[in-house]
Image: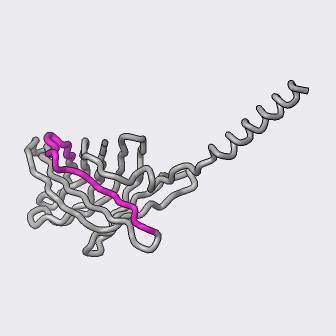
Amino acid sequence: MKKHLFLAAMALVGLGGTFTSCTPDPTVADRMEGTWLLNDLSMSGNLNIMGQSVPFTLEDSLIRPSSECTLVQESKNTVNSANYLLDVRGLVTIPAFGTFGTDIQDTVAGTWAIKPTDGVVLDSLIITKNDGTIERFEIISLLETSFRVRGRQTIEDPAAGTTSVTVELGYGR
């Protein structure tokens, strides 16, 4: 009799643990929320130089400590806020012209959202700047202490004109 009561008590304890340990998995937005430090930046594309389309790459050579991204989830009735600052020294390589340094500085405030997918394609991070410009990034990797995104951006330069580039950014905590 004592053996049966002991087994019944153990079964109840096991069932109780099953019911109390069921917490929902964090969403992609839950995992991305917080302040992240930029640790990698690369760009590639083509420049129009004297009527010729010339490929280029840019790799960071110095990421200043102020380069960070803060993503905050607000309550259900408000939008998620996004703020990021880029302050990077990069090395631009243009095969026909060599390598030179340039500074990239950008400050963005706006809102953010995650567009989840069915797992066949990558989830997207969508940032809407306060001026209405929308930037879309594929979430290449999302770990507990880092994430990496890739997107296409249009850069307007008075000397080089309009250029479409692929941008890849890595962040860590």
Dominant secondary-structure state across the stretch colored magenta = strand
Image coordinates of residue 146 in percent, x first then y, are 36, 42
Image coordinates of residue 84 in percent, x first then y, are 24, 58
Tell me if residue 95 can be seen: no
- Residue, x 69% and y 46% (percent of image)? 19
* Residue 117 horizontal side relative to residue 83, left or right: right
Q: Farthest front residue? A: 2
- Residue, x 38% and y 54% (percent of image)? 33
Q: Farthest right residue? A: 1
Tell me if residue 8 can be seen: yes
- Residue, x 20% and y 48% (percent of image)? 56
* Residue 117 horizontal side relative to residue 64, left or right: right
Q: Quadrant of the C terminus?
A: top left
> Was residue 153 drawn as part of the magenta stretch in this picture?
no
Q: Quadrant of the N terminus?
A: top right
Residues in magenta, as a range: 57-75
Q: Number of marks in the image? A: 0
Image coordinates of residue 55 in percent, x first then y, are 22, 49
Image coordinates of residue 50 in percent, x first then y, are 11, 60
Rendered image quadrant of residue 59: top left
Which of 125 and 58 lies nearest the eye of the viewer?
A: 125
- Residue, x 36% and y 46% (percent of image)? 148
Q: How is the image coloured?
A: one colour
> Was residue 60 drawn as part of the magenta stretch in this picture?
yes
Which of 142 and 92 lies nearest the eye of the viewer?
A: 142
